[in-house]
Image: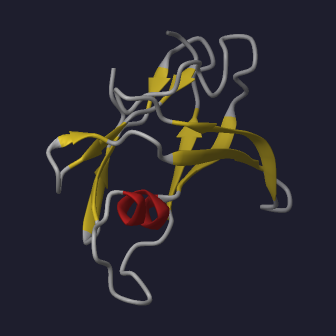
């Protein structure tokens, strides 16, 4: 896949994060307002079936991925405090090179996460 992709790895259970709802937003440079682009849900491999942005849709700018982690862990039967430490995980990143593929993986547990630019 090319464009903008992501995947979720569940560090608590040692498996792909299947069934995680993800939303993608673009931030307006002048106002900082979030503009909704699309939503998706991860498959059994913890990935989306299609890129969040195709090659033709990529624009230079700041984006935000919003991962609904609290819902995911509840569905797994994980006992979470109320309120949970992590309910939603927002990841803001800059897309500078519109000709390049961007992959933004999330490694997550109910208590922490790591994100990086993958390949």
Determine which quarter of the picture holds residue 8: top left
Q: Nearer the viewer, residue 111 or 32?
A: 111
Q: Is residue 33 above or below residue 57?
A: below
Residue at the spot x=31%, y=64% of the render?
77
Vertical arrangement, residue 32 with respect to residue 36, above or below? below
Q: Residue at x 36, y 62 (%)?
A: 73
Q: Is residue 58 visible?
A: yes
Q: Where is residue 116 shown, x and y percent of the image?
A: 33, 41
Q: Residue at x 85, y 62 (%)?
A: 31
Give the number of marks. Answer: 0
Q: Is residue 60 above or below residue 97?
A: below
In front of the other: 46 or 74? 74
Q: Nearer the viewer, residue 39 or 77?
A: 77
Would residue 32 be found to the left or right of residue 60 on screen? Answer: right
Corner quadrant of residue 97 = top right
Q: Quadrant of the C terminus?
A: top left
**Taking 93 as reference, is 28 left or right?**
right
């Amino acid at each position: 896949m090319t464009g903008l992709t992501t995947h979720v790895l569940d560090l608590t259970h040692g498996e792909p994060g299947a069934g995680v709802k993800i939303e993608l937003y673009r931030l307006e440079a002048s106002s900082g307002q979030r503009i909704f682009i699309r939503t998706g849900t991860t498959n059994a491999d913890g990935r989306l079936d299609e890129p969040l942005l195709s090659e033709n849709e990529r624009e230079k700018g700041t984006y935000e991925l919003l991962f609904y982690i609290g819902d995911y862990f509840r569905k797994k039967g994980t006992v979470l405090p109320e309120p949970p430490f992590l309910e939603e995980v927002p990841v803001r990143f800059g897309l500078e090179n519109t000709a390049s593929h961007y992959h933004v993986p999330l490694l997550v547990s109910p208590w922490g996460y790591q994100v990086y630019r993958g390949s």
